[in-house]
Amino acid sequence: MFDDVLRELERLEQGVEISIEVPLDEKGFLDRQCPSKPCQHQFKVLFDDWTDKVPDESAFCPLCGHTDHPHEMSTPAQEEYIHDVGLQHVSGIIDKALVSDAQRHNRKERARPKNGLIDISMSMEFKPGAPIIAVPPDAAESLRQEFACDSCQCHWSSLGASYFCPACGHNSAPSAFNTTLTTVRDFIHTFPALQRTLEEAAGPDSAETTLRQLAEDQFGRIVGAFERYSAALFSELPNASAFPAKGNVFQRIPDASALWKAAVGKGYDDVLTSAEVAALTRFVQQRHVLGHQQGIVDDKYIAKSGDTNYCAGQRLVIRPQHVIELIDVVEKLAASIRAALP
Ligand SMILES: [Zn+2]
Ligand SMILES: [Zn+2]
């Protein structure tokens, strides 16, 4: 009686391929979302790169680096749409099979010779329900910040900082470093506005303390990013293995400078003025004092930094312009190191 339905169900069991068109934004980017629970970062990948550069088995979240099957990177709206298209397809097939089964059964019944006084006959009626209509989700608005992978040239966009290429997972130390410098510089420039907002919300004392703390925190971010950038660049030198980088060598300015000089023939004093080397040394020592001594100066700091503005026992004062000075010197040094590479 249900021959067609059974046949279609068997075919569906084998799996069917349905092509689904998901809308792109006006720049041709496809909306994606990280499936990792704590992250859920929304980003976009140029559709041509998503199909050509992202491998069939894995894609990466540009924010947290989580790797998963590319199908898992759909947004909830896309998931719903894909689900509805599948349901629409299957219910269409089954409805058609039920109608044709019913029609065939009824034709047979009508043609059957009637037998005697009691003759039981049965007819089938089937009316398909309301059709399922899958509505494609609108693509989210284009994002301003676009990125291109140094390694595989995949293009993606993201709201805010981004670290990993969605196609190959490459995390470029130079671009992460530049992102950190830009982020911190932009952040420092918001301080006057931030001060007004904080004063309104929490009063002038709290605003002043918060801003001081925020400025101090940036020292750690910049020095940390520079250290990582230096280590990544150094490890790429063809002769890197001949110069084992001991401990946190890139935190120690004289040692790091000597290491570069030995490896590429140029130290920090070859690319910076002596005033810049002195400032960098002082800032890196200040970062150490902020990170490990609650900002309280000791004799070791004075000896290592050559900073005579303080006596042992005093507390460091970090102003927003000190953060900008640190960014400037670190930026110049990073560019010079890159230029000195073979
Ligand atoms: Zn993520
Ligand atoms: Zn890549």
Image (cartoon, grey):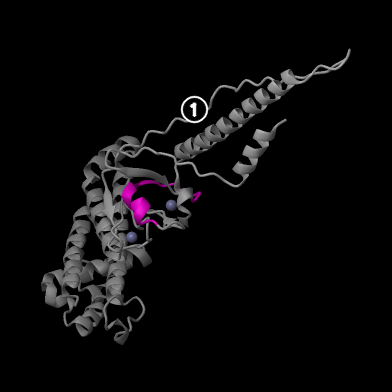
Q: What amino acid does circle 1 point to?
A: Ile
Question: Which quadrant holds residue 260?
Answer: bottom left
Q: Residue furthest top?
A: 117
Q: Is mark 1 within 8 Å of ligand 1?
A: no
Range drawn in magenta = 36-54
As rendered, which of 61 and 246 lies closer to the eye?
A: 61
Dot 1 falls on a residue whose secondary structure is loop
Residue 314, compared with residue 259, is above or below; it is above
Q: Is residue 64 left or right of residue 304?
A: right
Asked if residue 270 shows in the view, the reply is yes
As rendered, which of 55 and 106 lies closer to the eye?
A: 106
Neighbor class of circle 1 (other Cα within 10 Å; few <14, some 14-19, many 20+) is few
Q: Is residue 119 left or right of residue 231?
A: right
Residue 45 horizontal/vertical position (percent): 34, 48
Residue 59 horizontal/vertical position (percent): 42, 56
Q: Is residue 173 magenta?
A: no
Asked if residue 308 shows in the view, the reply is no
Question: Which quadrant holds residue 177?
Answer: bottom left
Residue 276, compared with residue 106, is above or below; it is below
The structure residue drawn at horizontal position 45% and vertical position 36%, both measured from the top left corner, is 77
Which image quadrant: the N terminus?
Answer: top right
Q: Residue furthest front?
A: 113
The structure residue drawn at horizontal position 28% and vertical position 68%, both measured from the top left corner, is 229
Residue 85 horizontal/vertical position (percent): 50, 35
Residue with the mark numbered 1: 133
Which image quadrant: the C terminus?
Answer: bottom left
The structure residue drawn at horizontal position 53% and vertical position 32%, both measured from the top left corner, is 88
